[in-house]
Amino acid sequence: MKIDISNISHRYDVEVLKSLTFRLEGYHSIAIIGASGSGKSTLLRLLSGLEKPSQGNILINDTNVKEESYRKLIGFVFQNHNLFPHLTLERNISLILEKTRGYQRAKAIEIAKDFLSRVRLSDQMHKLPKNVSGGQAQRASIARAFSLDPEIVFLDEPTASLDPVLTHEVLQAVNEFKASGKNFIFVTHVLSFVRDFADYVIFMDQGQIIEHGPVTLLEKPNTDAFKNYMSYIR
C-alpha cells in the first residue's frame, strides 16, 4: 500500500490535525494508535474519504481520496457497527451490494450469506441488529465491509464498546480475513491486536504524528510521549 499525505490540517471547533505530511509504501496492515483526542480517528476518516480535510491532499495507491471512484476501493468498520436497525443482518449486506455494486438481489443474498457464514453468523442472519449481541452485530459489520471486495479495509476502534469475550470474537473475525490479500488501516487501543495484526505503527499525540515504524517500534519507542503512552496501556 502507498500513502501520500501532503500538508493535511483538519478543524472541527478546534484544529484536530496540524499540517501533517507523511509518506509510506510497502506495508499492508497499518495501526494508528494514541490517547483519546490525539487525532487518530480523524486521520482514519480522512484516509478513508469519509471526511474531506480542511487543507491539503491525500493519495492512497495514487488515487485522491476525494474522488468518487475511491469509494469503491474501500470498506469501513465503525466503532458501533452502524448497521441499519430495521434490516436483518443478511439484508444489511445484500442491500448495500445491490445499491453500490449493482448485483441482482439473488446474487447479493448469496454473497451476504457466504460472508455471514465466514464470521459464524449463519444462524443469526435473519435477525435484526437489536436481537443479536454487540459482538455478533460487529461481526456482521465486518462481513459487510469484506463483502464489497475492497482493496483497503478501515477499522475504527472495532471493539471499543465490547467486553473482553466479545472483543476476542470480533478480532478473531478480522484475523480470519487477513490472508485475503487486502490492505488494512485501523485504529485500536488493543495492543495485542496491533502486535498480531499490524506490520506498521503510527503513534499520534495532539494532532501530530510523533513516531512511526515497523510494529517492533512498540517494544522500543524513541520519544518520551510514546514511552509514556506505552507505560500506561501495557
Image: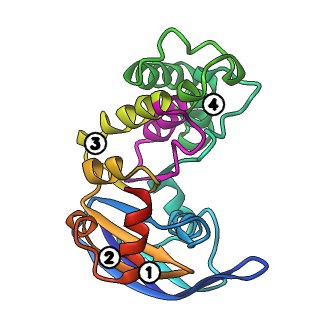
Residue 140: within the magenta?
A: yes
Q: Earlier in the sequence, mark 3 or mark 4?
A: 4
CB of mark 3 within 8 Å of CB of mark 4?
no
User: Label 2 belongs to which residue?
Assistant: 212
User: Label 1 belongs to which residue?
Assistant: 209
Drawn side of residue 62 relative to residue 105, left or right: left
Q: Is residue 169 above or below residue 161?
A: above
Q: Amino acid at mark 4?
A: Leu
Residue drawn 61% across and 38% down? 81
CB of mark 2 within 8 Å of CB of mark 3?
no
Q: Amino acid at mark 2?
A: His
Q: CA distance from mark 2 to mark 1?
A: 7 Å
Q: Secondary structure at mark 1?
A: strand
Q: CA distance from mark 2 to mark 3?
A: 22 Å
User: Label 3 belongs to which residue?
Assistant: 178
Q: Earlier in the sequence, mark 2 or mark 3?
A: 3
Q: Earlier in the sequence, mark 4 or mark 1?
A: 4
The span picked out in magenta is: 139-164
